[in-house]
Image (tube, rainbow, N blue to C red):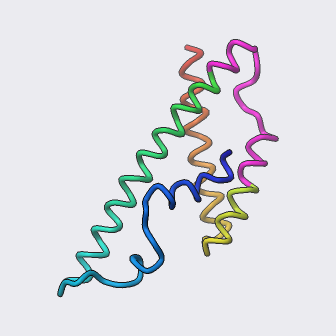
């Protein structure tokens, strides 16, 4: 499911390749591009919030089934898929790894809070 996170992000934005490369019919193309960045950033934050809600649900499941919060094998699978998907989008492996380590840390923080 998570291997499609980036694809879902892009599809939910409804942005085509054409709209990302051509300025609007305005004299201020920098403003146009900044508006696109703002919209994309907003969508990314909403999606990350949704992801954290799912992580909390996973945390509840782990508590009920007495599973460890940290599941290194699962994280490595998610990370590998993200790196592959990111490469297809022209994103560096270092960037994807840093991003996913931060996402993972926040997910673990949320899950640990549930145990308090």
Residue at 31% in and 62% down = 38
Residue 34 is inside the magenta segment = no
Which residue sits furthest right? 73
Span colored in magenta:
60-79
The answer to whether residue 74 is magenta is: yes
**Residue drawn at the location 62% of the way across and 61% of the way down:** 96
Q: Main secondary structure of the magenta part?
A: helix
* Image quarter of residue 69: top right
Residue 40 as seen in the image, left or right of residue 55: left
The C terminus, quarter of image: top right
Q: Residue at x 26, y 75 (%)?
A: 32
39 to the left or right of 77: left
Residue at the limit of the structure toward the bottom, as seen here: 27
Position of 57 relative to 20 (above/below): above
- Decide if residue 90 is on the left or right side of residue 28: right
Say which residue appears at 64% left-offset and 65% top-offset: 86
Q: Which residue is outermost to the left? A: 27
Q: Quadrant of residue 110?
A: top right
Q: Nearer the viewer, residue 23 or 58?
A: 23
Quarter in which the N terminus is drawn: top right
List x then y, in percent, for residue 11: 51, 59
Q: Position of residue 17 (x, y in %)?
A: 48, 77
As displayed, is residue 41 above or below residue 70?
A: below
Image location (x, y in percent) of residue 63: 68, 15
Q: Quadrant of residue 30?
A: bottom left
């Amino acid at each position: 499911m998570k291997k499609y996170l980036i694809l879902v992000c892009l599809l939910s934005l409804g942005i085509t390749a054409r709209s990302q490369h051509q300025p609007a019919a305005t004299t201020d193309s920098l403003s146009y591009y900044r508006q696109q960045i703002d919209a994309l950033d907003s969508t990314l934050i909403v999606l990350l919030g949704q992801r954290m809600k799912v992580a909390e649900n996973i945390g509840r499941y782990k508590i009920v089934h007495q599973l460890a919060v940290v599941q290194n094998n699962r994280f490595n699978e998610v990370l590998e898929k993200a790196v592959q998907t990111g490469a297809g989008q022209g994103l560096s492996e270092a960037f994807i790894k840093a991003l996913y380590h931060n996402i993972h840390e926040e997910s673990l923080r949320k899950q640990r809070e549930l145990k308090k």
